[in-house]
Amino acid sequence: MKVLLTGISGTMGRHVALGLVERDHVVLGIDRRPWPDAPRGVEVYRADTRKRPAEDVFRIQRPDAVIHMATVTHWGASKEERYRINLGGTRAVFDHCHKYGVNQALFVGRHTVYGAAPDSPLYHCEEDPPMAVSTFPDLADLVAADLYAGSALWRFPEITTAVLRIVYTLGPSATGTLMRYLRGPNVPTVLGFDPLYQFMHEQDAAQAIVAALEHRLRGIYNVAGPPPVPLSLLCKVTGRRALPIPDLLYSTALGRFGLPRLPAGAINHVKYPIVVKARSFHEATGFTPEFDEVQAMESFRWAGD
Amino acid sequence: MDLPTDPEIAERIDRLHFHWNHYGIDAFGVSKEHLGNFYSLLAWFYRHYFRVTVHNIEHVPDRGRAMVVGNHSGGLPVDGGMVLTSLLLEHEPPRLAHGMVEKFAQRWPFVSTWFSRVGQFTGLPEHAVSLLEDDRILMVFPEGARGTGKLYRDRYALVGFGTGFMRLALQTGSPIVPFAFVGGEEALPTKFHFKTIAKRMGLPYIPVPAYLVPFPMPIACDIYYGEPLVFEGTGAEADRVIEGYVDRVKARIVELIDEGRVARRRRLDRVLPVDATEDDFPGEVEP
């Protein structure tokens, strides 16, 4: 199968590309960032998904399937930039899929769309509403992108579309939302709160994306690996020190004393859990993770050694 | 922080059929260490403070899903704590029950963490379904906070039962084990409620007994379990049908309460002169 990956130069993009090459797929990629040592058989086009050169790749290469991973999740980008890439980019990709006869599309989204609140249930199923718009308003662009991608199911019924809501990832790359939060030696937690965190090894996440493609999934799927663990344990096993800060001082302390800077809404995601049920995904693909929770945490702990 | 754990409790927790990770935590975040501390504390209250006697606990299934459903009383949900303890301490094999907690608990620091680590989750239908589908025991008080918030003059009169639990039992195919908790009303005889302060703190109410301290007295309590009741259905039945089923559960709980109060009265008669016992007890008692 000829597969086009948007955002191929990111950590997850590279893992998925390698996974696909291993299974004898033809892999093309679009990214604004380079991938200098891309393996043989992977063609990377330096382009922005919303611009003409990206469309040319669709027109000339005619991929069978597209995996859309070119979304911005870090807080370094401006709000305008995030909306342009996460929503404008997603629109362009699905439009091109429709126009150039792509028959399968995968949107790689995040489990954080369900949001974290004191009354949110453990083990969200796919039908649960994406409460992150209220619990963590800075994630609104990602929630919108997730729902927008899902609308391709009825707007372009000829495309087999799947939206994957993947849990946090841990691994040697030390990149991604959760690993950015855990970056320093001291992790700012909220005093008296110890929510469950759900994550999987980054290689397992890539394998799950490959499995979703090969099983031609259609619809919305939560993707998870091993069971979640409390934040305190996550800090301990990854060799960090949890630094409990009283609720009222939390936002003042962030960005100071070597602690990471987080948007105001992030506090809910440090106080309350986001845990998803991935049973439908496991049943549809037969996917089983290779790394358990302890191995995933340790792979991040020793990253860079 | 190392809190004491009773070795007998630790041994019983080891016998639970849960999938613990390397650090003794299960998929719902229940922690063996926290369970050990929590149940060691509850066990002291169970054995020495409320001196709980449990009757017919063999009605609770040895394995698989079930809902234990009973009356709520006594201002603070100590009845819940004692029912949980009876299932871990006195049932063979030991069973861990999950309560359905008022929403405010998750907002409070420390309370949120402790309740999560000992398997006491917010009372959401999603939690009930996930736990029952995982073949666990759910402890349900269909009266909710209205039950614990009863005044002493209304003791043991069941207030409105919710119907949600019945739909969930039908949907998940869970048997219902009714129980009566007797003694809770006397342990904390609520005279009136502090409502304004409670509202400020996000609590449903604060119970105030005649002796003013909202803490239960050391009154001996009894738990009576009844035979499991099995209802057939999907959970999508009309309200009328569901209410009929709920009434049957409620009626059985009333019978168990009456049985318990009769036995209690007999016991009191043996140790106290007749005129010192509960004078307004409605049941007829044989001497």
Image: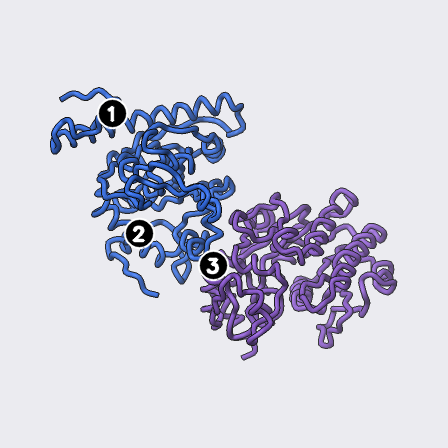
Chain colours: A purple, B blue
Find numbered disc 1 in the image and state the secondary structure of the residue it sits on: loop
Residue A9 position, x and y percent, is 71, 69
> Distance of mark 2 from mark 3, alpha carbons?
21 Å
Q: Nearer the viewer, residue B279 or B65?
A: B279
Q: Amino acid at mark 2?
A: Tyr
**Residue labelled with disc 1:** B280
User: Residue at left 38%, top 27%?
Assistant: B249
Relative to A31, is B102 on the left or the right? left
Q: Nearer the viewer, residue B171 or B151?
A: B151
Q: Nearer the viewer, residue A227 or B46?
A: B46
Q: Can you say which quadrant of the picture contains the C terminus of chain B?
A: top left
User: Residue at left 57%, top 67%?
Assistant: A252
Q: Amino acid at mark 3?
A: Phe
**Residue labelled with disc 2:** B39
> Distance of mark 1 from mark 2, alpha carbons?
36 Å
> Distance of mark 1 from mark 3, alpha carbons?
47 Å
**Residue labelled with disc 3:** A193
